[in-house]
Amino acid sequence: MKKLLIKIWPFVAIVLVVFLFFWKVFLLGKVPIPGDFIVGVYYPWLDYKWGYQVGVPVKNPVTSDVVSINYPLRSVAVDMLKQGHLPLWNSFMFNGTPLLADFQVGVLSPTMIFYFILPKIWAWTSQIMLQPILAAVFTYLLLRNFGLKKMESLFGGIFYAFSGFNMIWMEWNANTLVAAFIPLLILLLDKFINSKRLYWGVMLSVGICLQIFAGYPQLVAYTIVILLILLFFRREKLTSRKTFLIFLFIFVGLLLSSVLTIPAFEFILNSQRKFEILERELIYLPWQGLITFLAPDYFGNPATKNYFGVGNYTLNTGYSGIVVLMLSIIGVLQNWEKKEVKYLIILFMLSLLIALPTPFASAIFNSHVPAISASSMTRALVLVNLSLAALAGFGIASLLKGDKVKRIGFVFVPLVLLVSILGATLIARINLGITLRNLVLPISLSTIAVFLIILRRKLFIIALCIFALLELFRYGWKYTPFSSPNLVFPDTPSLAFFDNKKRPYRVSPGDVVPMNMWVPYGIESVSGYDAVFPIWWARLNKSISSGNPEYSNLSYYAPFEQYGSGWFDLLNNEYLFVNVSEQLFRQVEKNNKFEKVFQDKSVAIFKNNSALPRAFFVTDWDNRSDEQTLSLLIDPSFPLEKKIIISASTDLKRSDGANSMVSFDFYSSQNSIVNVKTDKEGFLFVSDAWYPGWKAKVDGIDTTIYRADYAFRAVPIFSGEHKVEFTYEPESLKIGALASLITVVFLAGVVIYDYKRIK
């Protein structure tokens, strides 16, 4: 038992430290998700107090994406999985959009297993808590492999787990998990380089695949780059055969993930992403942002509602802790000759080159490299956190051995810089109430750290490490919201209004429900907000709202607010949320097509009596180019309810009209059956998104789905009674699944061969 405890105590310590950070979960029953933002900012929840006297206070509005994208989409995916369906399609936003192919949903993430064991919100909580555990454990193992002892490896792992990037992105429930795999993959590659076993190469492939499945591809791309850099530092151990095998196993890891990556890249290529233009301040870390490496809240903090810095606080975080920074300086000074230390320094420098507005970063951003360009370059700051945490481990090792610190003057650099910043702040009088207050702690900690480092007593060094951990905890607790589970998408009367209504129908959130927050309630809308969604709806929506068919800057934020237009009716918007105290309410009241059918406190629901059904039959159509189509469709005189424009020619004969009946026999996100009865030939038009992978059968026979009205579906129908079935079965998924399966068989063969070879 004693031997077992000696072996496992660092892992037990990691779990205990993580549990300490999440003490609100265990002692208060709260969950790591900004539920306060749901009920404390927006209607219909804002009409209720949820146990508070004056409403729910909101801790950190910057984390709103967690409850407007990450949790809702994962919630939908989980519901489908529990129903026995692979969650391929999301019908609740944008008229429909791929779901599994959306990287950040993390449908195939290894931690999704929690949802089959625990209630949804507690499975989410378990996923969040597992991220720092894995980050700390994997970094601990890497540092042990780099030759450090347990104590310094333990602190290095914990420092990385609770560093700025991981802390900021923890509740997004994808980025931090992907970041946790970075030290593991470095470890697996190093093991393979130093071993004759193919087993480590197989594990490297599996690790790369799991990192991709975790849900944030930009970090995967950075990981591949730093793995290749490691080869340079281990070049004396590489033969041509081993080098070939390394590239092979990296490629096999990418191939193993094909079941996700092939549909995902198809999605990206067919999305608005390539036409989206990011603002410069969202792309790079501004040079003045380097101050936050020393004093993280020098420019304020969104959690305290006083952030005044350039750019986005969430994007610009490279903070590792002032004590960790000082320990990393010692790690460099004392261990400069070690290749592992030089490797970590290169990671640090590379991260800054990518994140800061340098020519190198600009070249990468404009390179059109998948998963790297067209995204914020500041994600590379995770490598700053990893390198500093690992270097701090080396610094702790030197201090615990009692080594005299070489060139100790460099240890004073952070303190000198902080004092200089203080002086410059006083002279320039930069928001003194915020800046001075947020300089006190880093200056105090760096001063204490200098004295403890000079004393070089083992007990003092351990105390210094605990100070470093508490510094990171304070930072994390300040930023990270915890909420009562009953604040996470609770019911209200206006939301319950839709509980038993037969689908399909759509609801416009109007000026009430914020983006995507209708999704957990099973409500469908044409509006939406996500990093990627189908280009056809993105461009059509932009053309309708702007009245201009020309390409313009498309955005991930896509509300549809043309309430009085024929498009609002065509898109099956049967209901509209309206705040009774806002101007929209007065406009809707005056429009005869709207009828108020429900009101609860500040929220009214109007029924759109002019809404067209989701599917209807037309006998008039035209075939035009995409540019001509958009110009025609935004013309107010175009008869949207009677005529469609299809993307290809057809032999069907037009007519003036038909006696037809259309009804849904079955409807779900990924499959629907429509009954059609008509006395003439024409098209069944469905205002659901056209997208590659949707298949249609008429009376059991495969038929073509035409892209109609630029973004929707139309199926040719002859006279008579017919049953039309729509199913989402993307070829990209089949190809990806086959590639993944072949790769699994290959890796299994390698493991068997390796076992027999060693035996």
Image: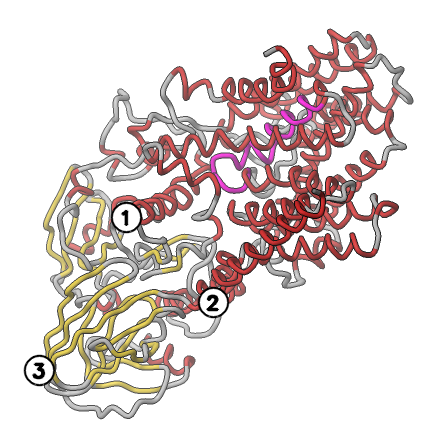
Q: Which image quadrant is residue 10 in?
A: top right
Q: Residue at x 28, y 48 (%)?
A: 83
Task: Answer with left or right where residue 436 lies relative to residue 704.
Answer: right
**The disc labelled 1 sits on which kind of residue?**
Gln
Q: Which image quadrant is residue 245 in?
A: bottom right
Q: Whole-Å distance between the Cαs marked 2 and 3?
A: 37 Å
The local crowd at label 1, few if under 14, some if 14 to 19, many if 20 or more residues have their Cα within 10 Å, is few
Q: Is residue 579 above or below residue 475?
A: below
**The disc labelled 2 sits on which kind of residue?**
Asn
What range of the chain is rendered magenta?
Answer: 153-176
Q: Whole-Å distance between the Cαs marked 3 and 1?
A: 38 Å
- For residue 105, say whether it is visible: no
In this orientation, which residue lies closer to the viewer: 650 or 606?
650
Look at the numbered disc 3 and give the secondary structure of its residue.
Answer: loop
The local crowd at label 2, few if under 14, some if 14 to 19, many if 20 or more residues have their Cα within 10 Å, is some
Look at the numbered disc 1 and give the secondary structure of its residue.
Answer: loop
In this orientation, which residue lies closer to the viewer: 550 or 251?
251
Disc 3: which residue: 659
> Residue 364: percent from the left, percent from the top?
69, 57
Is residue 40 inside the magenta stretch?
A: no
> Residue 240: percent from the left, percent from the top?
83, 56
Disc 1: which residue: 83
**The disc labelled 3 sits on which kind of residue?**
Asn
In this orientation, which residue lies closer to the viewer: 709 or 264?
264
- Name the mark on residue 270: 2
